[in-house]
Amino acid sequence: MAREIPYIQALGEAVHGEMARDDSVIYFGQNLGLTDEDPYVQAFGKDRVRVTPISETAEIGMAVGAAFAGFRPVVQLYMSEFMLVAMDQVVNEAPRFYGMSGGEVKVPLVLQAGYGFTAGWAGQHTGTIYGMFMGVPGLKVVVPSTPADAKGLMTASIRDDNPVVLFHSYLLTLEPGDVPEGEHVVPLGEAVTLREGGDVTIVGIGWTVGKALAAAEQLAADGVEAEVIDPRTLAPLDTGAIIRSVEKTGRLVVVDQATRHASAAAVIAAEVASEGFSALKAPIGLVTALDATIPYSQPMEEYLMPSEERIVAAVQQAVGSSPVAA
Amino acid sequence: MSDNGLSPERLTWMYTQMARIREFEERVKRTFEEHPGVIRGHTHLADGAEASIVGSLAALGPDDQLTSTYRGHGYPIALGTDTKALMAEIYGKETGICGGYGGSMHFVDVGRGFLGTSGIVGQGIPHAAGAAWGAQIRGKGQVVLSFFGDGASKQGAFHETLNIASLWKLPVVFVMENNNYQAYTRVEQEDANAAAGEPLAVKAKAYSMPGVTVDGGDPVAVYDVVRGAVERARSGEGPTLVESLVYRLSAHGNIIAPPGVPLHYPEHEAIHVFGNVEEYEAAKRGDPVPRFRAKLVTDGVLTTEEADAIGAAAQQEMQEAVEFGLESPFPAPEKALDHVYA
């Protein structure tokens, strides 16, 4: 039975559900579980729900150690940029031990990190930085684009035996959507096709999935049928699903809120160019944020962001400016 | 009755582990000369720290755990990990304790409580605290030892972790092996406490936990201090910072050379950087392994013959470890992709 709840509530439902299901799930971070009335504290007690100092290296490092000890830590980091002060733990500790130990040490943990808060937060709290993490072997990178996926992917992330960074979109925080009640699991590493079409493949990620779908509707009015794919997991990336779609459509536009050279879009484009070149009828279009530090002022901020109009323009360039003949 | 409640058998066990660690490290060092090219990358030896390692581990119970640094050969040896598997790991062989995936810097033996070794200075400290949080939740009285060096105490990870560990009264003991050198840099060149003539253990004061400095060349003294800290942690009173004063008898690590150039262990930094031969010679005169042997013989715990036999057994064991490592096969190249995701 599904009912409509916001994206952020869906994430919380997954954490709460997994804590209820599995005693080894522990939840901690800054400014949470502060009173005895806190619902997590009430449900699970202060052993498993803890507020931390502003100490990201220790928070993430202790998650690694708790994982060594058989727990499944979920670290609430709020903003993904806060991981940057603890990059060693995220990139060079958590994902390394399984490989370095020859498979003896598993490090199941989830880092919940919001990204892309381009809503007046200026230069240091608006980054779309998942691309920095998707090339780290052993680390999984998950970016839900809907409330239902937020719940299902968070649940799968907590159950996964690897370190996972779940990037939630700040711009989607209050976005409502139908979310199944009770257990809901969306497997990691599987893309989803949200709209079928034969003229062009549009890949959206997180917040840009909605933009891609809106652009597809606009294009349909002009007779261009776009297929829209959401990878949902950036590492491991479901390259096969994207290439199969491109083999059908012959054209690809990738839409990403990240700046171009730090984007997942660049990686996806490289994979398709390398593995699916013979299917391509046109150059791959990249619709990313423009390469600049995000300014505070709204007109400048919006100027840098991918938009429905820019997606439509990129698709039109890929298919030629005239409608595609049957 | 013997020192600090340690039975003659326990003291003999301690000396045996010290002798085994020393001999293992000697054989690693000799490998650079006798079998050039067998050991790759960077290798860090624990010779000089045997008393501190063994004294600390002697204070642990069977369910306790530890994490250490990339200078981490000594801990699993004392815990009973097969030295053949350890040497084979350093030689990059399939039979190594981590199957050749980790090498010298990343030993692990979860079954014996040795949870992992980070190769990045200071970054294993929060891992120990996280494991200690797990122990606190389980409530079965486990304690975790966190081993690191003096250099690590200038890392944010150290300070962040000591704060949380004290705040949460985690069952963890922080054992800082202060060997006076941060790689090649002398401690008073990089540590404000040392420069002011204070022990590094004063850092504990900032986190409202006990800070104790101990002679890390005396395994019984180390045992005594760490045992007290372990008991404190086990009873729920929280962590302790133990500063164990050691002197490493080898250089920070082997010379890292481009392919084709023989790798070797240079002289200790006291000599090759600072030209201070006397400091190093004094440290050699205080070498904790012969020092403890002499004490046990003087105290009547061991006869010289028994002490010699312990040394001979260690030599035989490590000879076999070297041979096993040399004879073992390399892993199949494609196994490189076996452990990307769990």
Image (spheres, coloured by chain):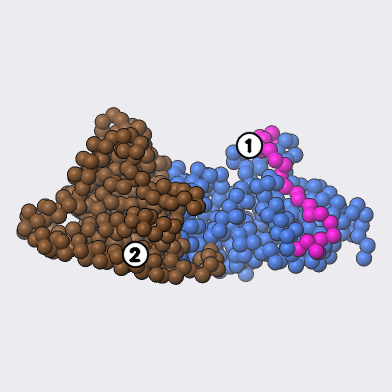
Chain colours: A blue, B brown
B101 or A40: nearer the viewer? B101
Specify the quadrant of the image occupied by residue B54: bottom left
Q: Residue at x 12, y 63 (%)?
A: B306
* Magenta run includes residue A288: yes
Q: Is residue A193 left or right of residue A110?
A: right
Disc sitting over residue B39 in the figure: none
Q: Residue furthest top?
A: B196
Task: Kindly check if marks 1 and 2 are in contact, taking CB atoms under 8 A apart as contact.
Answer: no
Packing grade of label 2 (10 A; few <14, some 14-19, many >=20) is many
- The image shows residue B338 at horizontal and vertical percentages of 52, 68
The image shows residue A118, relative to residue A321, as above or below, that is above
Q: Where is residue A147 drawn, in percent x and y?
A: 63, 59
Give the answer, above or below, for where B266 lies relative to A209: above
* Label 1, label 2: how far apart the Cα atoms are: 59 Å
- The answer, for residue A87, to whether it is visible in the render is yes
Q: Quadrant of residue A230?
A: bottom right
Q: Secondary structure at mark 1?
A: loop
Q: Quadrant of the N terminus of chain A?
A: bottom right
Mark 1 neighbour density, 10 Å: few (under 14) some (14–19) many (20 or more): some
Q: Main secondary structure of the magenta part?
A: loop
Respond whether the residues carrying marks 1 and 2 are from the same subunit: no
Q: Which mark is residue A122?
A: 1
| SS at badge 2 | helix
Residue bearing mark 2: B322
Q: Which residues are magenta?
A: A276-298
Q: Chain of mark 2?
A: B
Q: Residue at x 63, y 58 (%)?
A: A234
